[in-house]
Image (cartoon, rainbow, N blue to C red):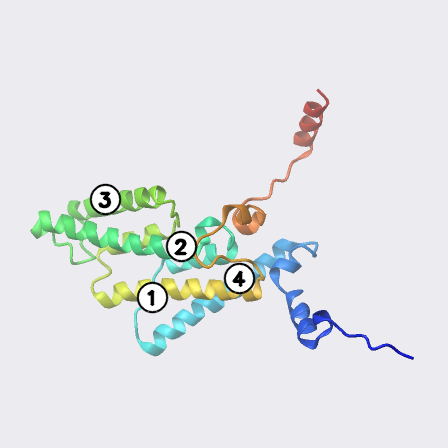
Amino acid sequence: MKENVQLGPQGSLLFRVVAFFSRLQLAYLIRSVRHPRFLVVIFVFSAGAIALGIITLAAYLIELPLLFPPLGPSAFILFHTPMSITASPRNVVLSHTMAVVVGLGSLGFVGMIWPNANLSDPSVMNWYRVMVIALSMGLIGLIMVTMRCVHPPAAASALIAAMGYLANAAQVLGLLAAVVLLVLEAFLFNRMIGGLPYPVWRADPTVSRSYGVLAGIPEVNTNFWQQLATKIFQHR
């Protein structure tokens, strides 16, 4: 007489489907293939192209300024080193926001002291513009380091604002909206396709360090002489 064997959750169809697709995620494949760097290249290419393609399409359909140069390097960091501290949503959103505020603030500050500086025209380059750029670059670097909210592409956002290219509220809101949209795309791609524990807001340094290259930690390849020196040192 056959006994009725009750299958647990592992025997359900849903579990098998989820398990199948989880084996296709970057987090699983990168530990099981011989050339993980090739997978990272494919992931960076596909995720970056689709993410910026969606933002470009949105800008075209709703006719709002959503495309700005800093989005390119930000997308590269978000998909090439998604587990790094600089790729966390907190660092990306706050640093770009602070950068825009600093750039516009520096522009307004110098323009208030020297009303005839003619800083409203981005094509004009004079000593007043030099002062605005130098002030904004120094301030955004100081703020990011002090607040431990470093995201290098944000410096470009400060430069754009200091150059006078954000002439109205629509452009300012468009840049910030594009940054938020890019972070949401990074969350979906890194979590669903990558299978990575991409943070909701703040990155955990302990978790980040365990992901090596995906956290921006370079691989250390020692040559013959370095290995020999290590062995000699260990025998002493």
Quarter the N terminus occupies:
bottom right
As helix, strand or loop, the secondary structure at mark 1 comes to: helix
Kind of residue sitting beneath label 2: Arg
Mark 2 or mark 1: whose residue is earlier in sequence: 2
Q: Picture coordinates of residue 51 (x, y %)?
A: 46, 67
Pointers 2 and 1 in contact (CB under 8 A)? no
Q: Picture coordinates of residue 209 (x, y %)?
A: 55, 45
Task: List the residue tagged with mark 4.
Answer: 190
Mark 3 or mark 1: whose residue is earlier in sequence: 3
Residue 160 quadrant: bottom left
Mark nearest the camera among 2 and 1 is: 2
Measured in 3D between alpha carbons, the distance from the residue under mark 3 to the one under mark 2, in whole angstroms, is 24 Å
Residue at coordinates 55% horizontally, 66% vertically from top-left? Answer: 192
Kind of residue sitting beneath label 3: Leu
Task: List the residue tagged with mark 2.
Answer: 90
Residue at coordinates 70% horizontally, 76% vertically from top-left? Answer: 13
Mark 2 or mark 4: whose residue is earlier in sequence: 2
As helix, strand or loop, the secondary structure at mark 2 comes to: helix
